[in-house]
Image (tube, rainbow, N blue to C red):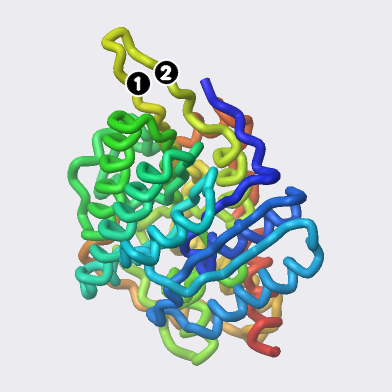
Amino acid sequence: MKQKIELENKYILITGGAGFIGSNLIISLLRRFSNIHIISIDSMATNNPIQLKEWRLKCIEDEVKNHPESTYTFIKGNIADVETVQNLFNKYNFSIVVNLAAQAGVRYSINHPDTCMASNIIGFYNIIEACRKSGNTKHLVYASSSSVYGGSTKVPFSVDDNVDTPVSLYAATKKSNELIAHSYSKLYNIPCTGLRFFTVYGPGGRTDMAYYSFTEKLVRGDKIDVFNYGDCQRDFTYIDDIVEGIIRVMGSAPEKKTGEDGLPIPPYALYNIGGGNPENLMDFVHILADELIRAKVLDNDFDIDKHVNLLPMQAGDVPVTYADASGLERDFGFKPTIDLRTGLRKFAEWYSDYNRK
């Protein structure tokens, strides 16, 4: 059972608000709900281009002007700093917390383990501990990742699968978040929902993701590296589907119940958000090239096959991601529907426009 939460007239904290998912979530919340109060925090880390983060913040600011009945506050700060987090919770009476701030990226975590641990472990702990101290958090929603499934060959990936063998530090931190959230929900009766995202993409996305980094290299005339000789599959999820899933989850918290022992039954839930339709990596590359040509980012005679380096699997990567999102459909009546070509077309059109400006 779920406990319904009205989002209007609530103070909502969104961490990672200048990030890809966070910024799109804020804009969608402003458009959908009146009299909503959003506080956003982001460290504005420079591992991704700061200009893109500033562009996302500008998009939010433009949207805010259309909704005078709501409020939006942006704070530059790091959730790994406990004083910053506690001051936020002391100032605002947050009913809902959406923790999207993280140092994302499998390969980045291998090369920068200290940054990954600070944001993903210390930062997450600071957030959930502040929720405990406030005593007002009706729902903590947090980002996990399909990376937790590691090299599992059982497909599709189910939230009931054993995920005790991560193959990257990033995956290990996300699994740790799930364990911490479960223990806090049990000990302190805090409703927590984790969302395992599957390869999120779309306009204004992370530049380290394949669809974006491939585009940048192809525009320069460079070759792109395709690992495992192209024999990989990814369950791509368009940003609008991700945001829709988050909003539905935000408004429906796991119900608080007491067990026969008189102690709380953990109000805890975990869901995959993925299309459930994995695409072959080489098919993805060809669709991306088609849409970049259509958007006039690449020339009409561009031959993608001449710009591909086929390489063996790299450390930390996995051969397949494949979401069983039946839980999301069962509990919220929703499943991602935007197909890869439609999503990449929107990205290519945005990329052309963004770079022209």
Q: Is residue 299 left or right of residue 307?
A: right
Q: Position of residue 304 (x, y in %)?
A: 51, 78
Give the residue at x 45% y 55%.
90
Give the residue at x 42% y 45%.
134
Q: Is residue 267 left or right of residue 167?
A: right
Alpha carbon distance from label 2 to label 1: 5 Å
Q: Position of residue 153 (x, y in %)?
A: 28, 41
Q: Regarding mark 2 in the picture, which secondary structure is present there?
A: strand
Q: Which residue is mark 1?
A: 265
Q: Quadrant of residue 316?
A: bottom left
Q: Which residue is mark 2?
A: 257
- Look at the image and tell me whether residue 24 can be seen: yes
Q: Position of residue 33 (x, y in %)?
A: 74, 48
Amino acid type assigned to the residue bearing label 2 in the image: Lys
- Look at the image and tell me whether residue 104 can be seen: no
Give the residue at x 58% y 56%.
238
Amino acid type assigned to the residue bearing label 1 in the image: Ile
Q: Mark 1 and mark 2 in contact (Cβ < 8 Å)?
A: yes
